[in-house]
Image: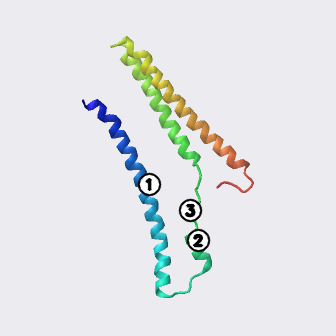
Amino acid sequence: MTLHLIPLAFLAFLTVCAVTGIVTDYKKRKASLEALRAAIERGQQLDPALVEKLMAPEKPSGIAPMSLIVGGIVTSAAGIGVMILSLLLSHEDHSALYPILGGGIVTLCIGAGLILAARTVEQYRKRQPHGPT
């Protein structure tokens, strides 16, 4: 009975995360324009450069290679831990070895992919003529 609630709880979690991100972006944008609105209401002279800066959308900072490396290390360590877990559980139930070992290998590959992605981003940024963004 409760087993079918797990996917629903996961989807609810994803929905809450997405909505929270949208609301946070909205509030940041509203706060940045609030100072501009207050200055206009007071009749102050506004610098065109300041208005341009406040009205311009935020530029994405790109992917942080250090975050990818940290995520890759943590994910790889989790994969190794799951692989060790499969060996320990196989002493109790021999049929558990290969499915759990496969999950550990997949997790280890995801971690290695994150580390590889971090190195690729670093190399890409070094080749850009305008420097890192």
Q: Quadrant of the N terminus?
A: top left
Front-most of residues 74 and 39: 39
Quadrant of the rendered image containing residue 120: top right
Residue 115's spot in the image, x, y percent? 58, 37
Up the image or down, 26 lies above or below 79; here it is below
Task: Please tell me whether residue 101 is drawn above or below residue 8 in the rendered image.
Answer: above
Q: What is the three-letter code of the residue carrying label 3?
A: Glu
Front position in the image: 120 or 99: 99
In the rendered view, does 23 fall on the left or right side of 57? left
Q: Earlier in the sequence, mark 2 or mark 3?
A: 2
Local SS, label 3: loop
Residue 45 vs residue 105, the one in the foreground: 45
Q: Which numbered disc flags the more N-terminal residue, 1 or 3?
A: 1
* Residue type, label 1: Gly
Q: Furthest-right residue in view?
A: 129
| Rendered-image quadrant of the C terminus | bottom right
Q: Which residue is mark 2?
A: 53
Q: Is residue 48 left or right of residue 87?
A: right
Could you say which disc has been placed on residue 21 in the image? Answer: 1
Q: Residue at x 50, y 27 (%)?
A: 106
In the image, taking residue 120 as reference, residue 70 lies left or right, namely: left
Q: Residue at x 41, y 17 (%)?
A: 87
Query: Dot 2 surroundings within 10 Å: few (below 14), some, or many (20 or more)?
Result: few
User: Residue 119, image x and y in percent?
Assistant: 63, 40
Report helix, strand or loop for mark 2.
helix
Q: Looking at the rendered structure, which numbered label has been put on residue 58? A: 3
Residue in view at x 40 percent, y 49 percent: 17
Q: Looking at the image, do the residues carrying marks 1 and 3 touch, with CB atoms under 8 Å apart? A: no
